[in-house]
Amino acid sequence: GMILNAKAPTLSQRLGRFTPFASVVLVSVICGGVMAQNAPSLVGAIAGGAGSTSTASLLPRIILSVLALHGIGFGVGYWIPKKLLPNQEQTARTISIETGMQNSALAVVLAKSLGAPMLAALPGAVSATAHSCLGSMLAAYWRVRTSSSSLGATATTSTTMREELEK
């Protein structure tokens, strides 16, 4: 992306309108595939079928771990830039979103490429789904909460963060 932006900025700008949607679709397909492959184990665990006690106890731990990971990432990613470093609100929010939304889809791809059982990819799939939803909800919350006069109506970007760091 950086090379394309440097060598062909017009093309990069045109493609940039579609890449967020393409990213969401691809992550959804990857995570949906992992969830579908683990569906029999998950349904058996929820229904309390025989031999599903390990999966039944695993699922709540995965969900709790995923929520804790991303919750801490969003919180610390906001608190440190805002309270310990002299950053503006918009910069703290940008860092929070970047920190909380780690690339969990990579965990799924690595688990699949290493030949691990499909159950090993489940935490990554749950995490990717959760961070996408949580990050979007947090960004929407901040957008609604912020008046257009204090931060402006534009979305936070990495460029804004870089400009803040250069000051």
Image: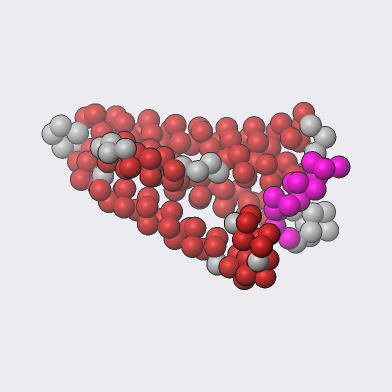
Relative to 164, is 79 above or below? above
How many labels sit on residues? 0
- Quadrant of res 46: top left
- Quadrant of res 14: bottom right
Q: Residue at x 70, y 33 (%)?
A: 79
Q: Give yes or no for residue 142 being in the magenta stretch.
A: no
Residue 125 located left or right of residue 90:
left
Relative to 79, is 145 above or below? below
Q: Give x and y (percent) for residue 3.
A: 63, 56
Single out the residue that lies furthest toward the left: 50
Q: Which residues are magenta?
A: 154-167
Q: Give x and y (percent) for residue 76.
A: 64, 32
* Quadrant occupied by the C terminus: top right
Q: Give x and y (percent) for residue 112.
A: 32, 43
Residue 130 located left or right of residue 89:
left
Q: Give x and y (percent) for residue 9.
A: 68, 66
